[in-house]
Image (cartoon, coloured by chain):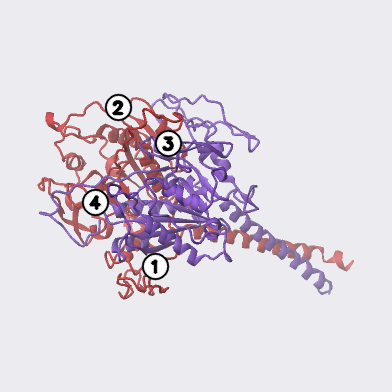
Chain colours: A purple, B red
Amino acid sequence: MARLCCCRSNVSLFLAAMTLGLLMTVYTIRTIQLLGEEEAIKEPITTFNNRRIPRTELLEENNNNNNNNNNNNNNNAITDGGGTVDSSSSPCECKERGTTVSPPSLETNNEQKIYLPKPVRNESHAQFNELPMIFMITPTYKRLTQKVDLVRLCQTLMLVSNVTWIVIEDASTYSKVVTNVLNNCKVKSVHLHEKTTTFVSRRKGGGGHRGVEQRNRGLKWIRDNHGLKDSKMGVVYFGDDDNGYDIRLFHEMRYTSVVSVWPVGFVGMLRYEGPNCQDGRVVSFHTSFRPDRTFPLDMGAFAVNLQILMNKPEVYINHKSAAGMLETTFLSDLEVKPSQLEARANNCKNIYVWHIKTEKPKMPYERQNPGDKTIEV
Amino acid sequence: MARLCCCRSNVSLFLAAMTLGLLMTVYTIRTIQLLGEEEAIKEPITTFNNRRIPRTELLEENNNNNNNNNNNNNNNAITDGGGTVDSSSSPCECKERGTTVSPPSLETNNEQKIYLPKPVRNESHAQFNELPMIFMITPTYKRLTQKVDLVRLCQTLMLVSNVTWIVIEDASTYSKVVTNVLNNCKVKSVHLHEKTTTFVSRRKGGGGHRGVEQRNRGLKWIRDNHGLKDSKMGVVYFGDDDNGYDIRLFHEMRYTSVVSVWPVGFVGMLRYEGPNCQDGRVVSFHTSFRPDRTFPLDMGAFAVNLQILMNKPEVYINHKSAAGMLETTFLSDLEVKPSQLEARANNCKNIYVWHIKTEKPKMPYERQNPGDKTIEV
């Protein structure tokens, strides 16, 4: 009877305890999710389209690069104890966070330096659906090294979340090689083709631009598929298939209100070309070619907010632009002002993209000894 | 009183419910962990050093490549509805799994092909501590494109778990550039330097080999730091810093009993050079240069089981080898027999590594217009 008399209170207690257990479960799941998201949603500091957005990545960059080119202040690094690299620098004062990063623990050895694995900032696994989408427009053309270049770029983008990779072949049809690469690539991608018809070489008075019609095909796809109504925050970037990218470039460009900019390595016959920046704004440009250009920027040196492009649906890249003027005419047509440019990459002090090419391989024995032709290289 | 009389049973009930809640929590955490590990530990099929090991990756490869160079059978691919690419091929019969992969859902459009994002097989996030370690030995030397090449390779390795990246500079000291790259690279890495002293060019009767002393320095580090006693399963691979890698190469080489092999793109002045394989074994080699070599393989064409190297502690790469004979002398010194070679990459039908170079950038304006010299390119 005593047991029976307690039935009601027992049930309530049981339910309360179960609820507590369930709450703990939910809390645990959420904690794990948050760990996956790292700090990205914890520090809304700056605004983007009048919304408060996380910019941990920007902060992270700034912290990592307070001592530019001397990154010994990295948390997990075990730096050299006996080499010639200066490891005596004091720990970086991370003013923006208001904390001091403790110095790295040293594993001294005269002959070796060991860097322990750091937590991978791979956005791909996290629940980053709220991140602004990066639409990366990549023209491509048939050549010996096309596949390896695309494979490397695919793998780079696998480390970035919320990317739509728009790959446009300069061809009148889809190639097997590109189809296979995108089929195996674990990135959301769009495969298009657009044969160049307007190319005029510089010798004949044209600008000698390549990739214009492919980039415009990519722009058209974005506009056709992402109306202003469902315009999620997003950014558009023109990234060639043979360039080299540090993934921090993507983490930073994602938050672009109008146009964000950064320097590019090996452009304009210089070690680097691009903006000189102060306090997040562009103060001048480092360039040798036509410094009178309004925007002396490489095509890989900027990203444009999606809404800027959607608000000017008639604006495409003008293939009639003079040599080196593609970027200036495009941004001018979008009515962007130089004062609106937003500095990235540690106030334009870091190189996160390199304008390079893969050497064409020589294969003099191929004709006489072709091997298995079904093997795709 | 009725409440008091129920105290004991209340407490037991409360405790039982709490325990249930906690068990649910633990179960949830474990489930999430297992999800992270994907299928890798679910299918122990083959053996490695007499231990049953998972080989989901190998299976995955075989499935993906049953129709070689026609990967339209990929689960998540949305293939072309109107293009010229053949999308009519029947779904692949995945015999090894005993299941039939359903055909991809089609989003028909005459002008575009969209590939939805696939689940990223990024081992880095998973609990793969039981995977055999890949020791990747990478010689590097100072040049304009050194940083971008290393950054790209770092990012490739970020997609592979249980890698120790051993980077050896051909220099008498540590460089800032490599230090910075490794400091920022989210891969476990070892940084060494070893200045070349034995290089003899082919014209002077030498083999013209580069990177030998650096690779040997890497081998020495592995032997010094991984005794036979604590010999975990592992594999050693010589991977140059400027080559291109499909990450599936690493997923496959990890399970190597003696020496695993595969073809390499753009080697030996051919489209590809390497083994011809049948049923997992090498039957001949495709090469133009000295086909009489016992192992006509590029340095990037094979991986060696760690214990094979530990059992022969006196064996290093012999810099006195004739041109093109480095690999043959090394594997012969390890007493490897051609019959022991294990085929990878879909019976040597797929190219997962390309022997390439990044073009040297030209910067004629740099001297007269040097820009900010503190910017590391």
Against B69, residue A268 (above or below) is above
Specify the amino acid type for callout 3.
Thr
Q: Name the residue under label 3.
A: A287
Callout 1–callout 3 Cβ contact below 8 Å: no
According to the picture, the residue beneath numbered tag 2 turns out to be B195
Front in this rendered view, residue A216 or A238:
A216
Label 1 sits on residue: B113
- Secondary structure state at the residue bearing disc 1: strand
Q: Earlier in the sequence, mark 2 or mark 1?
A: 1
Quadrant for the C terminus of chain A, please: bottom left
Query: Is residue B175 visible to us here?
Result: yes
Residue B262: image location, x then y, percent? 24, 53
Where does residue A221 sit, x and y in percent of width and height?
A: 45, 64
> For the residues carrying marks 3 and 2, which lies nearer the camera in this image?
3
Which amino acid lies under the numbered mark 4 shown in the image of this protein? Gly
- Chain name for mark 3: A
Q: Name the residue under label 4.
A: B265
Q: Position of residue B291 (x, y in %)?
A: 11, 48
Q: How far apart are marks 4 and 2 (CA)?
A: 29 Å
From this viewpoint, which residue is outermost toward the right? Answer: B1
Q: Do the residues labelled 3 and 2 touch (CB within 8 Å)?
A: no
Q: Callout 3: helix, strand or loop?
A: loop
Q: Which amino acid does label 2 sit on?
A: Lys
In the image, A62 versus A294, the foreground residue is: A294
Nearest to N terminus: mark 4 or mark 1: 1
- Name the residue: 60% across, 58% down: B26
Mark in the foreground, 3 or 4: 3
For mark 4, does the 10 Å Cα neighbourhood hold few (<14), some (14 to 19), or many (20 or more) residues?
Answer: many
- Say if mark 2 contacts mark 1, CB within 8 Å: no
Please identify, in this view, whether the residue under mark 1 or under mark 3 is nearer the observer: 3
**Mark 4 or mark 2: whose residue is earlier in sequence:** 2
Q: A14 or A142, which is in the foreground? A: A142
